[in-house]
């Protein structure tokens, strides 16, 4: 994908990222790195006996992080993404070990700023698993560079 400037986003704009499979190693490294060391993510016996889940779960924050990695990895923000300004998100379903996710994006909103070299773009990002189930939706707001 080519880099996108503020002017490139219009109501017809949308894109889909490549896919990524979530491995057990990914989950274990992530929960250890960020300190999410709780039975829900680490203890399979607990998971199977005390919850309705039968497979290892990925934390929602891992799903969001990998979704953002797929978006950034597309190249659309290379040299034009100036800041991530936040956004709302909703976790709609579980992501398990060996699930494969991808992100579909569409323009949600864009607005001018007082600085002529940038604008604010909000996209509507939907994360799906390999079965087509919507597992996460989020609305990232980003500061995007304009054409010079």
Image (cartoon, helix red, strand yellow):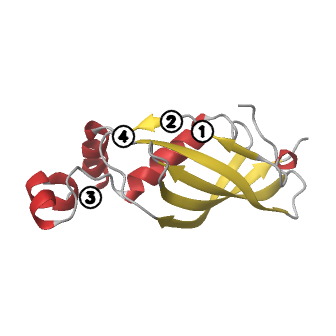
Q: Nearer the viewer, mark 1 or mark 3?
A: 1
Q: Which residue is mark 4?
A: 22
Mark 3, secondary structure of its residue: loop
* Crowding at mark 2 (Cα within 10 Å: few <14, some 14-19, many 20+): some
Q: Nearer the viewer, mark 4 or mark 3?
A: 4
Residue at image location 26% in from the left, 58% down from the top: 36
Percent coordinates x, y for residue 147 in the rendering: 89, 42
* Crowding at mark 1 (Cα within 10 Å: few <14, some 14-19, many 20+): some
Q: Which residue is mark 3?
A: 36
131 up-or-down from 40: above or below: above
Alpha carbon separation for disc pair 1 and 2: 6 Å
Alpha carbon separation for disc pair 2 and 3: 25 Å
Earlier in the chain: of badge 1 and badge 3, it is 1
Q: Which residue is mark 1?
A: 17
Q: State which quadrant residue 26 falls in.
A: top left
Q: Which residue is mark 2?
A: 19
């Amino acid at each position: 994908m080519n880099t996108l400037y503020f002017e490139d986003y219009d109501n017809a704009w949308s894109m889909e990222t490549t896919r990524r499979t979530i491995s057990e190693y990914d989950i274990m490294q992530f929960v250890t790195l960020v300190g999410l060391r709780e039975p829900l993510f680490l203890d399979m016996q607990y998971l199977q006996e005390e919850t309705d889940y039968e497979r290892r779960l990925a934390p929602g924050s891992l799903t969001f992080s990998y979704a953002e990695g797929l978006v950034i990895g597309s190249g659309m923000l290379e040299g034009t993404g100036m800041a991530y300004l936040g956004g709302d998100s909703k976790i709609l379903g579980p992501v398990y070990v060996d699930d494969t996710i991808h992100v579909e994006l569409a323009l949600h909103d864009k607005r001018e700023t007082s600085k002529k070299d940038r604008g604010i773009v909000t996209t509507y990002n939907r994360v799906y698993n390999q079965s087509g189930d919507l597992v996460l939706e989020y609305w990232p707001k980003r500061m995007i560079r304009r054409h010079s």
